[in-house]
Image (cartoon, rainbow, N blue to C red):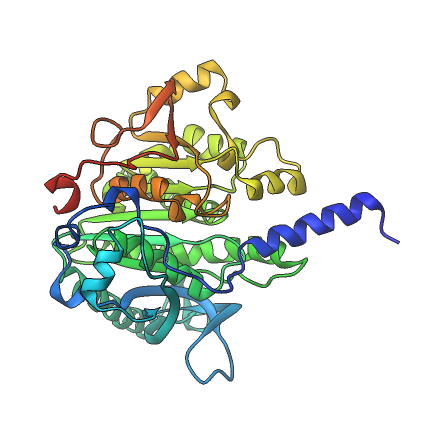
Amino acid sequence: MLRSSNRIVIGMVLAFAAVGCVGGRSLVATPYLLANSDPKAAFACSSPRMQDPTMEVIYVTDREPIVGSKTLQYGYGRSKRVAFGTAQVQLDPMPTWDQLIKDSTRLDRRQSYDLKLGEVREAGAFDAMWDRLEIGPEGFRLCHDAKCQIDDQRNKLYSLVRNRLDQSEHKDVFVYVHGVNNPFDYNVFRIAELWHFMGRVGVPIAYSWPAGLGGIRGYAYDRESGEFTVFHLKQFLRTLAACPGVERVHIVAHSRGTDVAISALRELHVACQAQGKSTQEELKLENLVLAAPDLDEDVFVQRFVAENLLRAAKRTTIYASRRDKVIELADVVFASGKRLGQLGPRDFQAHVRHALARLPNLQFVECDVTRFSTSHDYTFAHPAALSDLILVLRERRDPGPGRPLKQSTDGIWELTNDYLLNPTPTPRMLSR
């Protein structure tokens, strides 16, 4: 028989693995930022083609398609090819556009909308080229035909992105990287919601890596899938930054996806430094958001301080919460010292807080919020935290009058349940 301690650990791992699973999903509550706003003003920057209840996002994935499915679906298997295309998110019941934007700007929403994955259409894929390598003076290199094939697929991806950029005043691309145990549709839902409440500006992209095995081995499988996908994410970010028309790239990573994102960025940053180039300029990286990061504190310090990864993005924002039970569970299971996603003001020594305060492009936000969401998805599901995220991404604001976070101690900003609960909308806030 299993020892009692072993049974507890296994039970905790199973509980941790179950957190990311999705049954039904409904549209998140209205962000306080948009509450009581003029619906037409709040969505004034969305192009006429985007003013439809159905939301369409671009996806990029190295998941294997599910064999035997009547429609295109991606599972948790790892694929050597990186596919891209479009995925639709539908609402049930289906409202009119006017009904939807009214419900998206009111706190007392009369209708709950379930999210459903609609048509998924693959537009192309970057295939593995291991059999198309030849040996050159400097080692392995792709043959001419393989390079032509990659260029063809790159142009297809660029066509998707440029088509969306042409319909937006904002030439921004928002890339969302999910955490463990997330199926393909969950990732698409999350970026679709965020894009919708930002006023449907810019280009939303769901980067979906092979997670979601579930069960007792699920977290371990997903962690290794995270290592597997780093190479693909790195190539995608480099390709995206070279797309004509893209002015700014924003990366939003959640939970274990934060490790995936910064591992890819670290490799890109090292390469840029070796060439004497600016990572921020090469990747056009405006914002790096680490939401509820499932990341060891020492690893964060190594990468962001010792390796100076802070210079990779114009602004890095970290959302953490001492109430995050999932991160607390990860601490117990993996016996780490501290994880970044559960650190609060009291967890930092004075000299660390002072150091954070001297870094203007790093903002650490401790979210003391309850209700509306689980303890782990508060950044995207809580009306207060989601409001701040919108101001970071869409408005590119630092803390101050337009982003009224509290600061009770140096280097640490605090966000509470009533943040922007009664905002005074301004034209700049609602339509840029």
Q: Position of residue 52 (x, y in %)?
A: 21, 68
Q: Is residue 29 visible?
A: yes
Residue at horizontal 48%, vertical 27%? 344
Question: 267 and 246: which one is in front?
Answer: 246
- Return the x and y of residue 11 as percentages of the image width and height: 71, 51
Q: Residue furthest top?
A: 350
Name of the residue lying farthest toward the right: 1
Q: Position of residue 429 (x, y in %)?
A: 17, 41
Q: Is residue 191 left or right of residue 348?
A: left
- Number of marks in picture: 0
Picture quadrant where residue 384 is located = top left
Q: Is residue 86 above or below residue 3?
A: below
Residue 246 at x, y = what percent? 19, 54
Residue at x 40%, y 71% (from the top left corner): 127
- Image quadrant occupied by the N terminus: bottom right
Quadrant of residue 312 in the image?
A: top left
| Residue 138 visible in the shown view | no
The residue drawn where x is 49% and y is 64% is 183
Q: Nearer the viewer, residue 405 or 34?
A: 34
Q: Is residue 220 above or below residue 365?
A: below
